[in-house]
Amino acid sequence: MIVVLKKDATQEQLDHIVASIREWGLGTELSGSKTQRMVDVIGDEDLARSKPIEAFPGVDRVLQVQKPYKRASLEFKPERTRITIPAIGQSGREIVIGGKEIIVSAGPCSVEGRKMLIDIGSAIRASGAAILRGGAFKPRSSPYSFQGLGMEGIRYLREVREKLGMPIVTEVMDTRDVDLIDEFSDIIQIGARNMQNFSLLKAVGFAKKPVLLKRGLASTIEELLMSAEYIMNRGNEQIILCERGIRTFERYTRNTLDLSAVAVLKNETHLPVLVDPSHATGRRDLIAPMSRAAVAAGADALMVEVHNDPKTALSDGPQALLPKDFDDLMQDLGKVATAIGRTLGKQ
Amino acid sequence: MIVVLKKDATQEQLDHIVASIREWGLGTELSGSKTQRMVDVIGDEDLARSKPIEAFPGVDRVLQVQKPYKRASLEFKPERTRITIPAIGQSGREIVIGGKEIIVSAGPCSVEGRKMLIDIGSAIRASGAAILRGGAFKPRSSPYSFQGLGMEGIRYLREVREKLGMPIVTEVMDTRDVDLIDEFSDIIQIGARNMQNFSLLKAVGFAKKPVLLKRGLASTIEELLMSAEYIMNRGNEQIILCERGIRTFERYTRNTLDLSAVAVLKNETHLPVLVDPSHATGRRDLIAPMSRAAVAAGADALMVEVHNDPKTALSDGPQALLPKDFDDLMQDLGKVATAIGRTLGKQ
Amino acid sequence: MIVVLKKDATQEQLDHIVASIREWGLGTELSGSKTQRMVDVIGDEDLARSKPIEAFPGVDRVLQVQKPYKRASLEFKPERTRITIPAIGQSGREIVIGGKEIIVSAGPCSVEGRKMLIDIGSAIRASGAAILRGGAFKPRSSPYSFQGLGMEGIRYLREVREKLGMPIVTEVMDTRDVDLIDEFSDIIQIGARNMQNFSLLKAVGFAKKPVLLKRGLASTIEELLMSAEYIMNRGNEQIILCERGIRTFERYTRNTLDLSAVAVLKNETHLPVLVDPSHATGRRDLIAPMSRAAVAAGADALMVEVHNDPKTALSDGPQALLPKDFDDLMQDLGKVATAIGRTLGKQ
Amino acid sequence: MIVVLKKDATQEQLDHIVASIREWGLGTELSGSKTQRMVDVIGDEDLARSKPIEAFPGVDRVLQVQKPYKRASLEFKPERTRITIPAIGQSGREIVIGGKEIIVSAGPCSVEGRKMLIDIGSAIRASGAAILRGGAFKPRSSPYSFQGLGMEGIRYLREVREKLGMPIVTEVMDTRDVDLIDEFSDIIQIGARNMQNFSLLKAVGFAKKPVLLKRGLASTIEELLMSAEYIMNRGNEQIILCERGIRTFERYTRNTLDLSAVAVLKNETHLPVLVDPSHATGRRDLIAPMSRAAVAAGADALMVEVHNDPKTALSDGPQALLPKDFDDLMQDLGKVATAIGRTLGKQ
């Protein structure tokens, strides 16, 4: 951390700044030139960051040198994290996210009933999807929209999981439900709107299952990593980061899928990265090109909405693929994966 | 709701669309011209909105005509909501938010200790602040930052509340804490990062105390009203909406304070509007001009950070005013309030 | 400027960095600690900024300490710039922008004809507007929209100028038209979409008349000041900066009026600041509250669209005020101006 | 276009709306229901769009049904536009942009001298680049930055063009330079900051050479197509649209590359689409993954900055690839192109 002094800062102000920093157990070193004096803060930048140095008299600006996340950083842990989902039953296969294989999760936005889930699950498994997704508790911006089947949805997910030997991922929205989702789901999803629900992050930090952490609609990459740090700080280091589009002025797509974030994250962290093109674009016709692009950009996994009857879907019908289109997509993704030296993992 | 058909939509597709809409209990009427056919949907647009009409074959686009919020709308309830905070003890005075008086809440970002809270509380009360603010549970983007004193902070707030006869507002972050905050605080604050934490919204919807609902960093005005609708839908209609800055590309201020939102909200809803210039700008030197502007734009209330020693503050020191500067600000605000035909309410 | 080295930067890389910086005529000083080495660059940061130091091997990041604008900065010129528009004819009065008086410019978005301009001009002058605005060359996002009357519009503006003794402001869009607008208009307007049209900035830098420089829809405050610097660098130091809304995700208003920018600019630069609430909000019902807020925030001037028949206006009808509403607004603004110790300047 | 009436609109207001619309030569049809009355406007929506219907008494909102661009739309011209750049000299080869081949343009951000241009040009040609890029007139946010070699730069570009038989693309910034660039360059580039410089768009609309039109930093896809429409409306239909990143709140990358825009544009327009990953990300380490992703998303062309000594580059050094890295990139791109059924075009 570098404390840039105001041009007219007095010696007394400088002395006070230095004395305060040393009181916190940190070192200081004067630097800069006569016209631009600075104080380098030496030691744990996290500690310095928790202090309001910018409010000290004589301080113009504070420049941060170190990154604010630690456990999530590639510098801290240079080996890539591989997240292993154990095989389900006899027909299942162990899945590894973050390895050479690209893993695809698919399924309906919401679990709407038992039969639709069995049908969609069977179809996507046949096409090569490795994980079944489906929301039981649904975050909806309107209180008048379908809010999900809740516990009934969880039961259907479990039934299809056993039947098909396919791990499931579903969202948790409330700290009071973390134990339940931790017990019943193979991966615990934190939705975009809860990325900075710090109570929920702390709660899943004590969970046993891997966490799929979605980037907030207006969250920076750094904030996404800080939220991962919250979870890791509690002990759960099995985190999959998810890029799902950010909010911009562009109105043609629901959100703007930030694929640079995938490449940035691969440089900054050891955690695997998943891309959700369905929520990002909100348009069925963009799922295939954006899925191909995500794989080409280096994503370790994808999550794609599939519905056997999008026009009756209770949520996000317009962005769901039909099973047949999903099957075509998987063929295409296999080719792109091969082109960049990876393979498409299958259940 | 208007369903715009694709140019090449077949009669069969049109029939299917019309039949489906009628099946949901809604009416339809064909409109448009030969080159641009449309179907008007007649009846409850909320019901229509919950259906994936955009996913139907032959549909180009769906245009929404009605507003998605209802109880929060000025159309639904044309009288302005006034939120009454009862007098505390003998020295206190009843406060009304949403009337002719402009109400100012002030205090430290975080409750850091007993003495600082008494000192700051006494100072702001003397300057005319009506409500004491202070965070006990703090949402912080880093797990390594000060997370608030928790229950100890609540105790200090209660003590100062009784001592000064001044109502308090403090944040709730976890559904498990709603009962506690509802019991001890006069106003329950929902922070910007939790504006779409729907579990928390539902929980405070059952609370007895008024809710101060902060706009999310990337939330539209419509979404803010939808979140208010969540709370009202559970029964709690005492909501104060808070504009506290949105996230944009501008880097000079922490966020961009959207004062147009104040004027828009006054046109759209009967709920009172509060402005928080401290978190919006993140800069002490902008608090005074932005507070004056907020009052001139029509805000019913303000929330300003005040600290007696900003340079030792455990959170957001750089944006806190000193008690003396707050006192000057209150003088200025009184004049602006008078200029627009209102008055500055005082404790 | 501070060059932060990578953790694994070699001594050879460091030597190369230092040698290069010195070769450019700048000084260097090593700073930081053992774990975080840095090089302070001493001397003209502009020079250093023009060099690709970030591309040097061993460099992690470059932190800028000085501001990139100079002539526009309050530090460089501590006295406020006052822009004087000479009196027109015998009935006119000298106008000063940037003094104690708040100056209001008003008129139609586009000059649509002779009579409408005379009528609107007479009405706004009677209400106290000091300057007549009106577009002759109009930037329109569609080639199929009304593009302005061009030279014919300029003639009508001149005629009304002489008749009413009222200075005019109109936009220049093409370097080839700068001489013409410089001759005929009292103030030369650069539109938001041309804020970084550097050829145009250079051209008006040689003009004799003051320039009204509008902030780009996605331009930072720093970039606005850099664009002013372009003009000042060519010799024209008579610049009025204009905040007119920035592009955000919010859809209720056309743009988001950034009133913090007004307060920031008053701290950063000696140049006067004007606010355009009409283009910012795009909604007639928001003009009055946003104009009041702009004055309260410290704006030196306002520019308001007025039309005597908004429903036949050839551009931006929905945001224009009627002369009667403008008259009411001027009354209100006078009161807010008084409340903050200023007055409303009148023609 | 659909005119939604206010709930309390009077019959007189409705009659006035209908009469006015008919006066403009457009048809009307009443639609909607008793509680929600609407007027469908029949005929040329462009005409209706130029009228301020929203300002009419009794009007609540106006919903647009048709797209505001025409010549640029795929609906208007269903065959894909292929832009042919004739072979230069005997060593050159005809290039087609918009066909099966993916075309790569490469070179330095700025032309800095003769030798560097020859060296870089030779290197990228050997790696398979089809077009040489290089700026002679440079838009720079600071007047103190290197502004390009101007005419001298054009001469070097011409010399290398002849020598290598390689077409060139360079930027025009001023209407007064359009004839010159039209004569000397094979493709005329309009920079992002000039995307809505309508004078410049009209001027290149009369040029003979194809135009590379870069998306503005805060421009929507629709606005990009409207700007193309400006050029096409003057007669020049040879336009290559360029996605080069939009401005968002994210700070890790310089801009956010919006690859969804590529897929959207391929659905909306017959014009070819080029991606510029260098300016979008501003970071050398992201060029390769983003280039691969752009090809996978369906881009017809790429433009990549290459410098033989990025650390002495006079502009944008940190984002330029070394020739060797560019060569590796071309290998990778060839594989991704094959995976999606295309090939990499070479000079």
Image: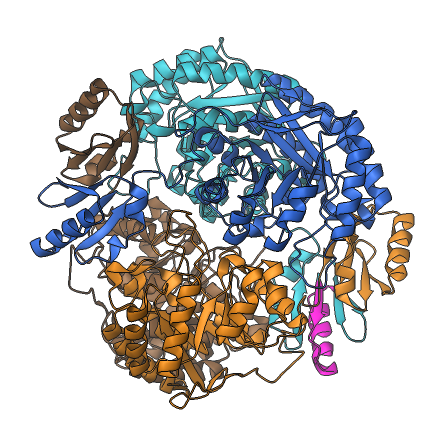
Chain colours: A orange, B blue, C cyan, D brown
At 36% across and 78% down in the image, what residue appears? D163
Tally the numbered discs.
0
Q: Is residue C320 left or right of residue D322?
A: left
Q: Is residue C26 one of those drawn in magenta?
A: yes
Which residue is nearer to you in this view: C78 or D336? D336
Task: Give x and y (percent) for residue C257.
Answer: 50, 37
Residues drawn in magenta: C2-27
At 75% across and 69% down in the image, what residue appears? C38
| Res. B91 visible in picture | yes
Which residue is nearer to you in this view: C176 or D220? D220
Q: Is residue C265 left or right of residue D121?
A: right
Task: Give x and y (percent) for residue D184.
Answer: 33, 63
Against C114, is B10 above or below?
A: below
Against A162, is C277 above or below?
A: above
Q: Is residue C156 left or right of residue A297?
A: left
Which residue is nearer to you in this view: D33 or D139? D33
| Res. C87 visible in picture | no
At 91% across and 53% down in the image, what residue appears? A15
At 76% across and 72% down in the image, what residue appears? C36
Q: Is residue A166 one of those drawn in magenta?
A: no
The N terminus of chain C lies in quadrant: bottom right
Against A306, is C181 above or below?
A: above
Task: Give x and y (percent) for residue C220.
Answer: 55, 47
Against D303, is C300 above or below?
A: above
Task: Give x and y (percent) for residue D25.
Answer: 12, 30
The furthest residue to the top = C90
